Amino acid sequence: MIVLAFLLWLLPRSAVGSLTIDDDEGRSETLEYKTILQRRGINFAELRQIASADDTPNDLYTIEVLLNFYENYVGEDKDKYLKVYEIDQIIQLSGIKRLDYKRLTFIAADGARVVIEPYENKDSLILLAFEKNKSEYTCRLILPEDSFSQRWLKNVARVSIK
């Protein structure tokens, strides 16, 4: 019986995951990945256009690396394996009002954090990419304008607006 339970546990599971968004007024909303993924995000061609824009750094550590991976290894249906959304799209979906440009804190499942100050997020492109790995999606923070991708963050679980 224990062996059977273990084997069932090893079977691929359906896409699961959620992203929690909270603010400084105590409101909190948890969005299931499947809810987010039903929305139209930035498609692969639009992402390629963002990456090749003149004002986006074009070195090995930028969004180009991620795009090249999907271009070369995923095949025809890239948009099925990489769905990208601007942070404002996801905040709107949560129903939490983002007044002004406040500090955004992205927190990964392992506790790692990336803070984006108000002066940074006013004019910057802030993306959340949902990458499909086997049967599950993971959420990654992408800051195309960030030098050397130092503040990219994998497995984002929470966004805090303060």
Image: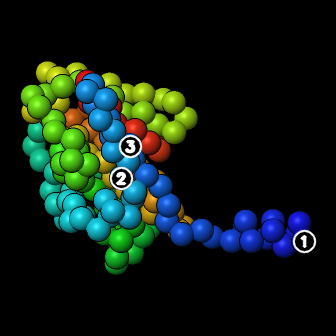
Whether residue 145 is visible: yes
Q: CA distance from mark 3 to mark 1?
A: 36 Å
Coloring basis for residues: rainbow
Type of the residue with mark 2: Leu
- Which amino acid does the dot numbered 3 rest on? Thr
Q: Tag 3 or tag 2, which sits nearer the N-term? A: 3
At 44% across and 42% down in the image, what residue appears? Answer: 157
Q: Which comes sooner in the sequence, label 2 or label 1? A: 1
Label 1 sits on residue: 1
What distance separates the C-alpha of mark 2 from that of mark 3? 6 Å
At label 1, counting other C-alpha atoms closer than 10 Å, the crowd grade (few under 14, some 14-19, many 20 or more) is few
In contact (CB < 8 Å): disc 2 and disc 3 = yes
Callout 3 secondary element: strand
**In the rendering, at what x and y percent does residue 114 appear?**
37, 28
Examine the rendering and report whether any part of residue 152 can be seen: no
- Rendered image: mark on residue 31: 2
Question: Residue, x 14% and y 21% (percent of image)?
Answer: 119
User: Where residue 156 sits in the image (x, y, percent)?
Assistant: 42, 42
Q: Can you say whether 82 is above or below 142 in the image?
A: below
Q: Which residue is mark 3?
A: 20
Q: Amino acid at mark 1?
A: Met
Which of the image's four quarters has the N terminus? bottom right
Of residues 110 and 152, the one nearer the viewer is 110
Classed neighbour count for the residue bearing mark 2: other residues with Cα under 10 Å, few (<14), some (14–19), many (≥20): some
Nearer-N-terminus badge (3/1)? 1
Q: Residues within 10 Å of mark 3 (few under 14, many from 20)?
A: some
Quick one: quadrant of the C terminus?
top left
Label 1 secondary element: loop
Residue 88, horizontal then vertical, whole percent: 18, 45
